[in-house]
Image (spheres, rainbow, N blue to C red):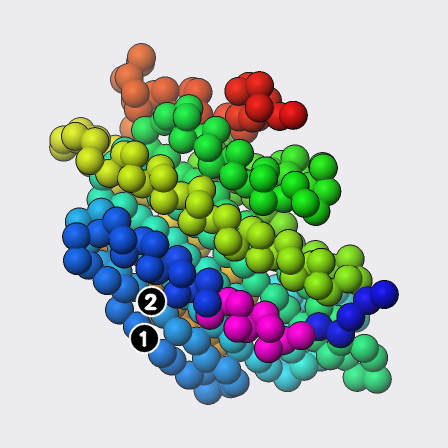
Amino acid sequence: MSQQPDINAVKTYLLDLQERICARLEAVEDGAVFARDAWDRPEGGGGISRVLAEGSVIEKGGVNFSHVMGDTMPGSATAHRPHLAGAPWQAMGVSLVIHPNNPYVPTSHANVRFFIATPRDAEPVYWFGGGYDLTPYYGFEDDCVHWHRTARDACAPFGEDLYQRYKHWCDDYFYLKHRDEPRGIGGLFFDDHNTGDFERDFGLMQAVGDSYIEAYEPIVRRRMAHPFGDREREFQLYRRGRYVEFNLVYDRGTLFGLQSGGRTESILMSLPPLVRWDYSRVPEAGSEEARLTEEFLTGRDWLKEAADDQ
């Protein structure tokens, strides 16, 4: 039997998730902390932006909570739901991007979100979405296996095929069509999730949200002291350009935020502080830079290759 969506429970969870992720990331720093910036949205709602800049490990990181609402659903949210056009709505979520200093530590992104719309003379319509993905600059197979194993284990209680479905969805979604290449090594992505069982659907979002830091923190700790020089730094800044291109051209969250009158500073928090674009740059054959695109950014099934898919 389906339950009515509990908006307050979702909000309580998301605020706690933001606090827990910030605390875990601050624990790898040498004293740097996330600043707290609470804001209101004139059209309705608001949020809390948590930003850490110029840390010893994190060059720029943001972990945002938002709870916004309006009288008419934005176009980006009704493209596949025309029956909700004109309906009052609420949206809340935690969205984060971490850009480390060390090129051997990958950039990571995560998001969990909840939408609810109330059409006139109809029951509320809700759905969950979210996921996380990893964008390395220098590839390590054990990092990729750990990342995907954690994602698989988070999905396991909700269906045997869920991880593979959401992995493929992630690979398809975080793909730069104009570059004909993946943004990173993937992870999980899902949207429009509503089975009619609110508690189970909410449980899936919590499992994904809770597992992000378990997937990312061990990789950060493993790589954050890896020596690097100007060559690696320049390559990192060059590859960050791909991240910017995706977020400004394809990312649904960015489009929704801008279309719904969201707070621009928080929406564009995902962009790295430094980036470069080099004309027709081609990595040296046989280099670690070439290996990134040749061996890692290929949509691989990391767990199957590691004989860890049972």
Q: Main secondary structure of the magenta part?
A: helix
Mark 2: amino acid: Arg
Label at residue 50: 2
Mark 1: amino acid: Asp
Residue nearest the observer in this picture, 192 or 180: 192
Which corner quadrant holds the C terminus? top right
Residue that label 1 marks: 37
Element on which disc 1 rests: strand
Asked which quadrant contains residue 222, the reply is top left
What residue span does the magenta drawing correspond to? 6-15
Label at residue 218: none
Task: Using a 10 Å C-alpha cutoff, classify the residue at mark 1 as few (fewer than 14 neighbours), some (14 to 19) or many (20 or more).
Answer: few
Cβ atoms under marks 1 and 2 closer than 8 Å: yes
> Of callouts 1 and 2, which one flags the residue occurring earlier in the amino acid sequence?
1
One can see residue 250 in this view: no
Element on which disc 2 rests: strand
Distance from disc 1 to disc 2, alpha carbons, whole Å, reads 6 Å
Asked which quadrant contains residue 47, the reply is bottom left
Left or right, 49 with reference to 42: left
One can see residue 122 in this view: yes
Residue 143's place in the image compared with 162, above or below, is above
Q: Residue at x 30, y 24 (%)?
A: 289
Residue 162 horizontal/vertical position (percent):
69, 41
Residue 13 horizontal/vertical position (percent):
53, 67
Residue 282's place in the image compared with 101, above or below, is above
Task: Using a 10 Å C-alpha cutoff, classify the residue at mark 2 as few (fewer than 14 neighbours), some (14 to 19) or many (20 or more).
Answer: many
Which corner quadrant holds the N terminus? bottom right
Q: Residue at x 71, y 58 (%)?
A: 200
Residue 82's place in the image compared with 55, above or below, is below
Residue nearest the observer in this picture, 305 or 82: 305
